[in-house]
Image (cartoon, helix red, strand yellow):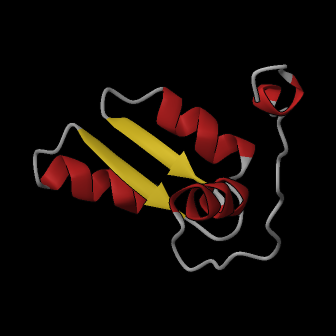
């Protein structure tokens, strides 16, 4: 994380996104919270959530059909 932040500083960036398929240690999270640069940490769980949410690298597993009442079926006019 320190090398990543060093790169941000070197390029004059004020924010960055660090993605891992694993997880972040508590010390890495505390470290990034103490910085003037904004560092977004995306761990493996959040990455999977984002992939599913945006349909990246995923495919439909099951489709659920939601039924609603057809009120016209029960009306005397229909």
**Quarter-of-image position of residue 57:** bottom right
* 54 is higher (above) or lower (below) than 35: below
**Residue at the farthest front position:** 77
Of residues 16 and 72, the one drawn nearer to the viewer in this rendering: 72
* 6 is higher (above) or lower (below) than 15: below
Of residues 75 and 36, the one drawn nearer to the viewer in this rendering: 75
**Quadrant of the snapshot with the C terminus:** top right
**Quarter-of-image position of residue 12:** top left
**Residue at the farthest top position:** 76
Q: Which residue is drawn at 73% across and 42% down?
A: 26
The number of numbered discs placed on residues in the rendered structure image is 0
**Image spot of residue 69 (x, y percent):** 85, 32
Of residues 47 and 62, the one drawn nearer to the viewer in this rendering: 62
Q: Which residue is drawn at 39% across and 52% down?
A: 17
* 57 is higher (above) or lower (below) than 19: below
**Residue at the farthest left position:** 12
């Amino acid at each position: 994380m320190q090398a990543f932040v060093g790169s941000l500083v070197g390029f004059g960036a004020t924010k960055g996104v660090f993605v891992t398929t694993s997880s972040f240690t508590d010390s890495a999270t505390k470290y990034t919270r103490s910085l003037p640069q904004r560092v977004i940490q995306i761990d493996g769980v959040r990455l999977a959530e984002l992939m599913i949410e945006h349909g990246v690298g995923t495919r439909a597993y099951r489709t659920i059909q939601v039924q609603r009442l057809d009120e016209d079926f029960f009306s005397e006019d229909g």
